Every structure is written in C-alpha cells, then in structure tokens.
Amino acid sequence: MQSRLLESASVHFIAAKHMQPIKRYVDVIHFRLLPYYFHNFCHVSAMSISEIWYLIKDHGTNYCNLYNLMDGSSLTEARGYKEITSDFLCTQRSSANCTVV
C-alpha cells in the first residue's frame, strides 16, 4: 500500500512525502506554483527526491511520483498541459513504468 503524507501547503508551495510500497523508501515531494493571472494559467515546478541519497537509479520512481499525481487528478488532460523534463533532469524517466509505482 502506498502512503502519502502532506507536510505543508500554502498558496505557492506544497510539500509532501511518499512511501514506496515495496522497499518502504521515503521520497520528499515539492511543488512550486506560479500563477500567471493575465494569461489564465499556472506554472508548476515539481521535484521528488529519495531521502536515501544513493537511490539514483530508481527505475523512474521519482518521476512516477509526480506523474501519477498529475495523471490521477486528470491534470494531464487539461487544456494547455505541458510536461517539460528529460532523463538528465529526471533520472530514468524514459524507462519508467508508472503503473507499478
């Protein structure tokens, strides 16, 4: 069972933790929200990092933490949704299987 815990939230920032279901590693998740009032959209910067420093090759787990939140809330289908990332920014993103995380 996956466990998510909201740490803090404000108008422009959300902090949470996610416990991975199998090995029980904890990931720290941050969202930074920047509204663009004149253009009627919001820019979201997000990152997920394991609390264990040596979990660099995590099979895309940190990418999936963020993607599954966006997809589960249907924001990936919202008009204007755009994801900007890469394997350089998000280790193993291109090989991630987000259905098992």
Image (cartoon, helix red, strand yellow):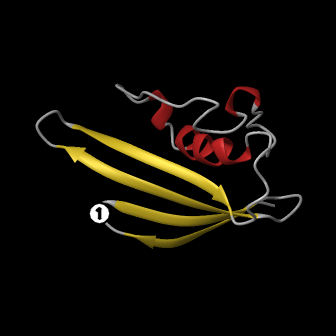
Q: Nearer the viewer, residue 52 or 67?
A: 52
Q: Point out the residue furthest to the bottom here.
A: 7
Residue under numbered circle 1: 11
Query: Is the residue 8 above or below the residue 62 in the image?
Result: below
Query: Is the residue 56 above or below the residue 78 in the image?
Result: below
Q: Is residue 38 left or right of residue 35?
A: left
- In the image, residue 13 lies at what x, y percent? 37, 62
Q: Amino acid at mark 1?
A: Val
Q: Is residue 87 left or right of residue 75?
A: right
- In the image, residue 31 lies at what x, y percent? 45, 55
Q: Point out the residue furthest to the left here.
A: 38
| Number of other residues with Cα within 10 Å of mark 1, as a class: few under 14, some 14 to 19, many 20 or more | few
What is the number of callouts on the image?
1
Q: Give the residue drawn at x 34%, y 52%.
A: 33
Query: Is the residue 96 above or below the residue 100 in the image?
Result: above
Q: Give the residue drawn at x 35%, y 25%.
A: 79
- In the image, residue 19 lies at what x, y percent? 74, 64
- In the image, residue 100 lies at what x, y percent? 81, 41
Q: Give the residue drawn at x 89%, y 58%.
A: 22
- Quarter of the image for residue 26 reads bottom right
Query: Is the residue 24 above or below the residue 68 in the image?
Result: below
Q: Give the residue drawn at x 79%, y 54%.
A: 55
Q: Is residue 3 left or right of residue 45?
A: right
- Quarter of the image for residue 87 reads top right
Q: Secondary structure at mark 1?
A: loop
